[in-house]
Amino acid sequence: MKSFLYSKLNPASFTWVRPEQGAEVSKVHEWIQPLTTGPAPETSNVDFVVVGVPLSRSSISASGASEFPDAFRRAWKGFTTYNLDEDVDLSERIAVDAGDVPMHVTDIRRCHENIIEASAALHHHFEGAKVCAIGGDHSITAMMVKGLRQAKPAEKIGILQFDTHFDLRDMTDNGPSNGTPMRNLIESGVVKGTDMYNIGLHGFFNTKDLKQYADEHGVNYITLRNARKKGIEETVRQCLAELAAKVDTIYLTVDMDVLDIAYAPGVPASTPGGMTTAELLDGVLAAARHPKVNAMDIVCLDPLKDTQVQPTVKLGTHVFLTFLTGIMLR
């Protein structure tokens, strides 16, 4: 199994030294096991799989989001496995770090093909695990979902998206970029527009023609203003209830540009008026508690634009751990 996976994946560029067997585990970096070191656990026993997808050449704007998987792993040392808010200890489950999807220096199409192949391999070999992709720009979402579809062709897939943008740009203008993943999935027939729910759109950051495309294809979208009126958690629960009635599995994508720029200095496209930290964490927790949410990604976080104490990197890591918490609360 390990050799087959590593034909699709590279070892992470940074890994922590694991504690000796039997040692007490209390920090995230002591808990998540790199598949490159030590004996691999039985695939049927693995609950969570982390995979880095270090691609940002396909970003419309200049982005160092390819650096986030490495910064994300380095941030683990600052977090314990115990979530005080929910009285949940993540170390009760088994988590592995599968490494990074290999990227070509210049060929974006090849990078995207590698992501599809890696996603399919992970979903096939860790059939019961929740796969968490750490991007990378938002173009990776379409590829991770296409890989999921290859691994589980009989399952109908839906999308829950936290985002400031529709991500429905015309692919003839932008190619498979970070502005096109949802349109990519619609036009490739992998996910229907009616099976997409986008929460967090706001302000002056989408063009009218993108709204018209969303309406024509039945994309479900809730502006941040309307989500706040109803409550973020209630909005998420209602969207998931509708989506779950139509699909077999739900993919959660968290574009960190959904956050207000005050909370996300390390996000190139963050804007005024976006979500607060608390709103995003509450939304992710509510989403993860739903039994059909079986995979997720975190995208568009650029550590190179973050401040010295890396608040955005830490928040991205917190989003990931919150997602795992929600899984355990089911």
Image: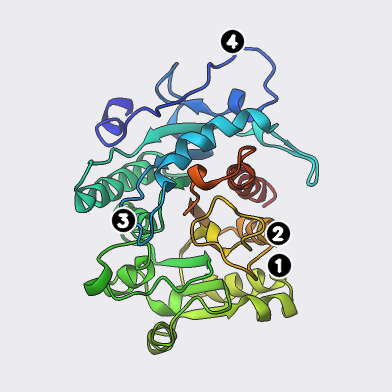
Q: Residues within 10 Å of mark 1 (few under 14, many from 20)?
A: many
Disc 2 marks a residue whose amino acid type is: Asp
Q: Where residue 64 sits: x, y (%)?
A: 42, 46
Disc 3 marks a residue whose amino acid type is: Ser
Nearer-the-camera pick, 151 or 49: 49
Q: Where residue 250 sits: x, y (%)?
A: 49, 62
Q: CA distance from mark 3 to mark 1?
A: 32 Å
Nearer-the-camera pick, 7 or 242: 7
Residue at the spot of label 3:
58
Q: Earlier in the sequence, mark 2 or mark 1?
A: 1
Q: Secondary structure at mark 1?
A: helix
Q: Earlier in the sequence, mark 2 or mark 4?
A: 4
Q: Where residue 316 sits: x, y (%)?
A: 58, 47
Q: CA distance from mark 4 to mark 3?
A: 41 Å
Which callout, 2 or 4, points to the residue nearer the camera? 2
Identify the residue at horizontal 54%, vertical 61% (top origin).
257
Disc 4 marks a residue whose amino acid type is: Glu
Identify the residue at horizontal 20%, vertical 46% (top origin).
106
Q: CA distance from mark 2 to mark 3?
A: 30 Å
**Cβ atoms at labels 2 and 1 below 8 Å apart:** yes
Q: Is residue 229 above or below residue 302?
A: below
Q: CA distance from mark 1 to mark 4?
A: 40 Å
Is residue 234 rendered to the left or right of residue 239?
right
Residue at the spot of label 2:
282
Residue at the spot of label 4:
20
Q: Is residue 12 above or below residue 236?
A: above
Q: Residues within 10 Å of mark 2 (few under 14, many from 20)?
A: some
